[in-house]
Amino acid sequence: MKTVIIFCLFLLPALLNAQQNLSLAVLKYNGGGDYYANPTALPNLIKYCNKSLGTKINEDPPYVEVGSKDLFQYPFIHMTGHGNVVFSKFEAENLRMYLEAGGFLHIDDNYGMDQFIRIELKKIFPNQELVELPSSHPIFNQKFKLAGLPKIHEHDGKRAQAFGLFSNGRLVCLYTYETDLSDGWEDQSVHNDPGSKRQEALQMGANIINYAFNN
């Protein structure tokens, strides 16, 4: 069964372009971190993509456990939170297989995840280091032309950074740090961010989705 699902992952760019209904998902993980943070973020981004990119993605994304075979049903997984993350050996292997099969993982540090997620990513790709993506990377030059990763919330005042992990030359994991990108996708009433900031965040999110399906 997993072999069939893995094969389907390779066909997903064509399916998206053919306007088929697809679902994205939010990653549910262990360790005590709030994987459920920003509940309106991914649904709002999907609605924005359906409007601005012409996609037909289901607007009610489910939560999927990192060790579940159901992971392979979703071409794009979003992960966020403020605290601890722990992947078991089995979960790390499952996630590695998913990524190598054609899946894409976007991790957005919601302020507090960084020290934990870097350790867990080494379980998935032990011989790799996170590589910072320059502003010239194609992910910033999709539907929307952006100068780089937008800074939605200040927190420590550090610059926003986008990091990547690669498999066979393909970007399979995007880690956005010191940006609070998914906060900018949430309902406006949650953080009361200016409309311009929310627009930047949604445009970047649409670029990520577009890139993940077409590269």
Image: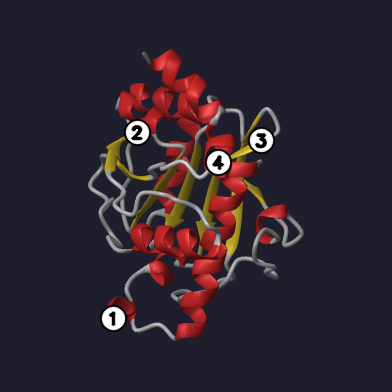
Secondary element under disc 1, as helix, strand or loop, is: helix
Dot 3 or dot 4: first in sequence order is: 4
Q: Nearer the viewer, residue 182 or 29?
A: 182
Give yes or no for contact between labels 3 and 4 (Cβ–Cβ under 8 Å): no
Dot 2 or dot 1: first in sequence order is: 2
Dot 1 or dot 3: first in sequence order is: 3
Give yes or no for contact between labels 2 and 3 (Cβ–Cβ under 8 Å): no
Q: Amino acid at mark 4?
A: Ala
Q: Residues within 10 Å of mark 4 (few under 14, many from 20)?
A: few
| Count of marks, rendered view | 4
> Is 208 situated left or right of 189 in this image?
right
Dot 2 or dot 3: first in sequence order is: 2
- Asked which quadrant contains residue 212, the reply is top right
Q: Which disc, if any, is residue 18?
A: 4
**Residue behind mark 1:** 189
Q: Residues within 10 Å of mark 3 (few under 14, many from 20)?
A: some
> Is 117 situated left or right of 31 in this image?
right
Q: Amino acid at mark 3?
A: Arg
Q: Which disc, if any, is residue 87?
A: 2
Q: Quadrant of the C terminus?
A: top right
Q: Amino acid at mark 1?
A: Ser
Give yes or no for contact between labels 2 and 1 (Cβ–Cβ under 8 Å): no
Give the spatial CA distance, label 3 vs label 4. 22 Å
Where does residue 75 sit, x and y in percent of width and height?
46, 37
Where does residue 110 sit, x and y in percent of width and height?
38, 62
In the image, residue 92 sits, relative to residue 105, either above or below, namely above
**Residue behind mark 3:** 170
Give the spatial CA distance, label 2 vs label 3. 23 Å
As drawn, the residue found furthest toward the left would be 32
